[in-house]
Amino acid sequence: MGMPISSYTILSAIADESVTYEIELAERVLRPFKLFAFIIHDPEMHQRFHDFLAHQFDRLDYVTGRRLLFFALVDPPQSWLDHRQDRDYCRLFTQLKGEEASRETRELLNPDNVPASTDKSNTAFSLASALNIPIEKLPCIVVTQGFQLKDFHWFRTSPDRVEEQLIRLGYIADRAERPMSEIKSNWRELDLCSSHGLESLSDSLARVLSDVLSFIVAGAEIGKRQGSWIQSKALSQADDAVKRLYASIDYLKNANEEHINEELDRLCICLISFLAQLNNRRRIDLNEFLNIHREHLEYDSFQILRTAYKVYDMLSTSQFKLPVKRDVGEVFDFTPGVICMAKVFEKEANLAVVHWARKELGISLPQYFNKPQPGVTATVVPQIPGGREIDLNMNRNGKWLPPGIGQSEIACQELSLLGLPDEWDSTSWYLLLNIWRRVRVRRNEAAHSELMSETSMLEVRDMLQEMAEQRLFEKFYKMKQRYRGAR
């Protein structure tokens, strides 16, 4: 069954965990369901999937039964809205109109109260980042037994597989005594697109989802319904989320441990993707900030740059409605901007020149592009005093784990002494290594300094622009296509 549980107020009420009349009503609405599933997709990037979902939503609503609740997090299709009056939760809302219920209660259960995102691509990017789902694995179905829980399973989906996956979830919800245990032990029945994951959050799923939606609601409401109860609540939660993210980033900076780099990257990406939802400009042209051909970049690289620019655009035009500045002289901390810009360089280099290095060390491409190859040792021992072995085939839970930005730099530099990659000459190669060093220095500063300035972020931006002007991203693109096996 489909439902706009994406109502920000419902998820926020569950996340608050306080015993109130509103939460009791929300629990009454959700009690009949044994499994919950929501779909994350980018309508622009996954247009065929989006069209299928829009045209078949009412059919999917019917064939998935009455014990599975599934939904798209924003903007339900009209075909679903046309039939919602027959649903039990809508009848409950209708009954509430005749009761003495508070305004907050009516808002809580109002099926019309679904946040309308002004940037659906950014919304999908925000949700995936917050849930630690790789953006390249979208579209996907997230499955849980309750929004108050921290654990969930996700499965990649497609226009050709989503109906069968939802039907199977509906069957499990209706028949299994312990649905999530059934899914965990028989995940192959749902993994029809050869990609899945089991994640555990530090907070409840309701908290994480309502954090994301709070920025959408706040961004959509600003200037339209000033002073509304929902807007006030969303702005307050968004502000709290920003403070928590900055606190976590500061904690990781002070931890001074190498393994925290991935989590620091994720938190910075989450922060910029959240804040970007507050930008009311509907048309943002990345070329105003950084002129790189979109087709040369990975999808997540482009989204990182685009969302970073949306946040920078708000700072430049004083659009911010949240007190996100720090206490130290009211200076905004640009750590997330520096980290995210450096992440784009690292991502593109990993899939291009680092894969050249992997190939030189015996990794079979394209079969093991962006994957670890079993039984192969692909290591580089730097010819410098105290140089540590660098593993370019590291496996973590079946996924390839690239070395850090500095180790990759050293590995590629060492291997280039034996010969440069195809299509690279000494001038362009030394330019790349020079920019690599400068990006690494700024990235490491951001990972340890208390505050990063706007100048530091713009310096990394300029390095990426220099790469684009010297056609290094074009070289990266050709390498990625070749190693992927694209014709």
Image (spheres, rainbow, N blue to C red):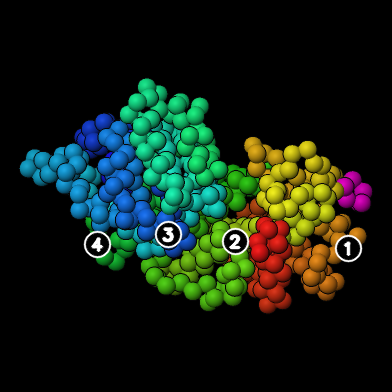
Name the quadrant containing residue 396: top right
Q: Are marks 3 and 1 in contact (CB under 8 Å)?
A: no
Left or right relative to 117: residue 388: right
Categorize mark 3 by other alpha carbons within 10 Å: few (<14), some (14-19), many (20+): few
Q: Quadrant of the C terminus?
A: bottom right
Three-letter amino acid code of the residue under disc 4:
Arg
**Nearer-N-terminus badge (4/3):** 3
Residue 44 in the image, given as x and y percentages of width and height? 44, 63
Categorize mark 1 by other alpha carbons within 10 Å: few (<14), some (14-19), many (20+): few
Q: Are marks 1 and 4 in contact (CB under 8 Å)?
A: no
Residue 384 falls inside the magenta stretch:
yes
Residue 406 falls inside the magenta stretch:
no
Could you tell me which secondary element the residue under label 1 belongs to?
Answer: loop
Residue 330 in the image, given as x and y percentages of width and height? 51, 61
Q: Which residues are magenta?
A: 381-386
Magenta region, main secondary structure: loop
Total numbered circles: 4
Q: Which residue is mark 2?
A: 298
**Above or below for 73 versus 322:** above
Q: Residue furthest top?
A: 177
Confirm whether residue 259 shows in the render.
Answer: yes
Q: Which residue is mark 1?
A: 419
Q: CA distance from mark 4 to mark 3?
A: 34 Å
Q: CA distance from mark 3 to mark 1?
A: 44 Å
Q: Which mark is residue 48?
A: 3
The residue nearer to you, when weighing 318 against 49, is: 49
Q: CA distance from mark 1 to mark 4?
A: 63 Å
2 or 3: mark nearer the eye = 3
Categorize mark 2 by other alpha carbons within 10 Å: few (<14), some (14-19), many (20+): some
